[in-house]
Every structure is written in C-alpha cells, then in structure tokens.
Amino acid sequence: MTEVCGICAIHADAAGHGALECHRGHRWIVRHHPLPSPLAGWTFLCSTRHVQGAADLDDGEAAALGPALRAVSRAVRDLTGCDRVYAIAFGQGAPHLHVHLIPRFDGEEGTRAWNVADWYRAVERGERPAADPGEVARFVDAMRERLRRETID
C-alpha cells in the first residue's frame, strides 16, 4: 500500500484548506497554517512537486526557491508587522518540501527562536489561544492580493 502524502492531500483539498491558500504557481504553493493556527501569518511555502527536501529539487526549483522565499517572507513581515520571519523546514512530518515562514515579534518572548515550538505545542494542547480566525482570514486575503503583484513561479 502506498502512503498518501499529507501535504499533497492538503493541496488537493480545495474545499477545506483552499480557503487558506494564498498563491498557486507552477513550482510553489503558498498557504496559511491550518486552523487553529498558532499565529496569524504562519505561512507555508510548499513545492508543487512531491519532493523530499531542498537536496532533491531540480535546477528550476532550486533557482526559483530563493526568490520565492524572499517574496513570501517580505510579505509575511510587511503584513504582520513582525520584526523578522523565521524559515524552518523539517521534512519529517511529510515527505514533501514545505517551509514554515513564521512571524517573529521582538516584543513577544514566546515567538523567540525555539520558544515558537513551545508556542505551537501550547496551542495544540489548548493551553494558549489560537490566532483569531478572522485575523487569519484577513491575512490570507491581504497575502493573496500582495502575491498577485509578485513573481512566484
């Protein structure tokens, strides 16, 4: 039996996760973290092709990754007002490249470095409130508009 890739399933689920999709290009899909989201603006840059990680990108994907990361990271920073954007790709939960782009606010200790992982787990356990779904929806709308003006392959 072939295992289903969770990321591919999300990309195919236009009814459920489609509401959080911000951009779909030839090589990259940009979407917000599913609800309940730890932070409004927690965004994913995902390869459209089923590929384990950066080491397995073809030449075109590798060339497009830097500009895509820059464009989406700038948009996350501009739209959330955060101080920086963390880019993290584990590649363990699903065999499909997806880079977490996480807003970091200097005034919020919980988003500092690896503290953001504790923040994430606390939301999962119900110990910390998730981001407001309305705020997430506003972010997604603004990100869609922003990325219409960007070249993301």
Image (tube, grey):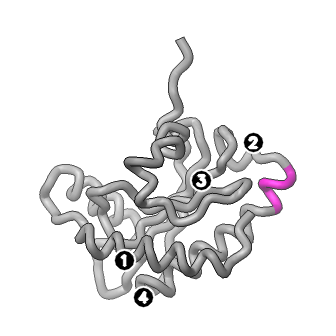
Q: Callout 4: 10 Å neighbours few (<14), some, many (20+)? A: few
Q: Callout 1: 10 Å neighbours few (<14), some, many (20+)? A: some
Instruction: Identify the amino acid type marked 4.
Output: Gly
Dot 4: what SS? Answer: loop
Who's the residue at 66% across and 75% down the image? 70
Can residue 53 be found in the magenta stretch?
no
Q: Is residue 103 left or right of residue 116?
A: right
First in sequence, mark 2 or 1: give its number.
2
Residue linked to disc 1: 138
Residue linked to disc 4: 81
Question: Along the line of sight, which residue is nearer the eye, 33 or 126?
Answer: 33
First in sequence, mark 1 or 3: give its number.
3
Q: CA distance from mark 1 to mark 3?
A: 21 Å
| 2 or 3: mark nearer the eye | 3
| 2 or 4: mark nearer the eye | 4
First in sequence, mark 1 or 4: give its number.
4
x, y (%) of residue 121? 26, 53
Specify the farthest residue to the left.
127
Who's the residue at 54% across and 79% down the image? 145
Instruction: Identify the amino acid type marked 2.
Output: Asp
Q: CA distance from mark 2 to mark 3?
A: 14 Å
Q: Kindly identify which numbered label has been placed on residue 56.
A: 2
Q: CA distance from mark 4 to mark 3?
A: 23 Å
Residue linked to disc 3: 46
First in sequence, mark 4 or 3: give its number.
3
Q: CA distance from mark 2 to mark 4?
A: 33 Å
